[in-house]
Amino acid sequence: PSPTYSMLTEMSGFEKPALQVSPKAPSDSSILFRVTLNESTLLCGRPTGAILGARLKREDRTTSFAVIQVLSSALVMFQSIENPDGTGSKTLHVSVDNASSLVNTEFERVSPSQAPPMIGPTGAEFRVVYATENLGCVVSQDISLDCEGVKICVTPNDFAIMCNISKSMIDRLKEISSPRQNDTVSEKDNKVPFSDDSARHLSSIIRYQKKGTGIATSIRIEIHAVSFVLLKAYKSHLGSPEFLDFCLSELKGRYEGCMSALSGETTAQFSVNFYNADAADWEYSMEPVELIVELDQMPNELMLNFSAKSMIQFNLTGLLLRELADMKFDFNQDRRTGDK
C-alpha cells in the first residue's frame, strides 16, 4: 500500500492589509501575510484497524503498520517591502512551538498526556531575508535557524520506522511536485537503482547547476542542545531501559558565499554517555570534546575538514561492549516481528 498522511489543524490570524495606491509614481508598498496553526496534527504511515482488515489480508504482510504523529503549533509570516528607489526586501519567518513526535499503531491523534513523545517537545525559528533591487530582483539572501533543546528517546526499531516512513513520504511528495512526464519508454523500463539515485542526489550537493545559485548568501545555524537517547529493545515494567545518550550542545555554524560556493565552519560540544544499570548512573563512554567541521564548497568540488580541539577519549568497559553486542540493530525488521 501507498503511504498516506493526514493533517488536522486550526488556522487563524490571517492578515493581508489593503494596499493604498497613490496616483503618484513611484511609491513604496508592503504586503504582510500571516498564518497561525494552533495544535496542528500530522499523521503519516500505514494505519491498522478493523476497516482495513479485509484489504490487509490481500496485501504484503511484511509491510510496517506504524504511524508517525507530529504535533506542533506554528506561525508563518511573509512580508514584502518595496521602496520608491526600487530597492526592497522579502522576509519569510516560520516559528514552531511545542513540536513533538511519536510512533503509534493507530491512525488517530494521541495526546501527549496519554503517551510521552519520543521526540520533543521543542521549538525552532527559521527566517529567510531577501534583499531586492530593480523592483523585486533578489541580490542577496540571509538564512538563519535557531533551535531550542530537543530530546529524542527511541529504540533502534522505532528510529528505523521513523526514517523509512519519512523517506517514503518525501519521495511521494517529490513525485507529486515534479512528475517525470518526459521519460521515454526505455528510461521507464530501465529505472535507476536506489543506490544510483542516491548518488545522483549527493552529486547535486557538490555540483550546483540551478538558476540563482550565484546570489550572495549568508547562513547561520544555532542549536542549543540535542540529546539522542538510544533505548534497549526490550521493555520492563518501567518501560524501555536507557542505553546510550549522544549529547550535542552549543552547535553554531556560519557560512558565507553563494549556494554554489559556500565556506565556513560549524562547532559543537559532543559526548556519549552510557547508562550503567549496575551502578544506576550515567558514565562517559566518550569524554566531552569540541568538534569543528570546516566546509569549503565550489561548483565542482566539496571539501570537508573534521577536527577536534582536544584528544578524543573513549571509555569502553566490558559491560558496555557486552550490552552493545546484545542490542538489536536490525533496522529492516518489522515492528510486528519484535512483538511475536
Image (cartoon, rainbow, N blue to C red):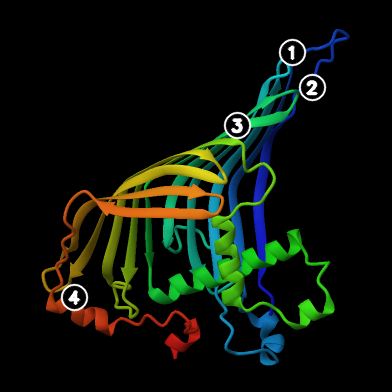
Q: Is mark 2 on a helix, strand or loop?
A: loop
What crowding class fits label 3: few (fewer than 14 Cα within 10 Å), some (14-19), or many (20 or more)? some
Q: Which of 65 and 106 is in front in this view?
A: 65
What crowding class fits label 2: few (fewer than 14 Cα within 10 Å), some (14-19), or many (20 or more)? few
Q: Nearer the viewer, residue 84 or 50?
A: 84
Q: Can residue 147 be seen in this view?
A: no
**Residue at which label 2 appears:** 18
Q: Is mark 3 on a helix, strand or loop?
A: strand
Side of 123 relative to 276 (left or right):
right
- Looking at the image, is mark 1 or mark 2 nearer the viewer? 1
Marks 4 & 2, CB-CB < 8 Å contact: no
Taking the spot 67% from the left edge, 22% from the top edge, the residue there is 88
Numbered label attached to residue 126: none
- Looking at the image, is mark 4 or mark 2 nearer the viewer? 4
Q: Kindly identify the amino acid type of the residue bearing the numbered disc 4.
A: Leu
Marks 3 & 1, CB-CB < 8 Å contact: no
Q: Kindly identify the amino acid type of the residue bearing the numbered disc 1.
A: Pro
Residue farthest right in this picture:
23
The tag earlier along the polypeptide, 4 or 2, is 2
Side of 134 relative to 69 (left or right):
right
What crowding class fits label 1: few (fewer than 14 Cα within 10 Å), some (14-19), or many (20 or more)? few
- Looking at the image, is mark 1 or mark 4 nearer the viewer? 1
State the separation of the CA atoms marked 4 and 3: 50 Å
Residue 118 lies in quadrant: bottom left
State the separation of the CA atoms marked 1 and 2: 18 Å
Residue 275 coordinates in the image, percent (x, y): 20, 68
For the C terminus, the image quarter is bottom left
Q: Is residue 322 visible?
A: yes
- Looking at the image, is mark 4 or mark 3 nearer the viewer? 3
**Residue at which label 1 appears:** 84
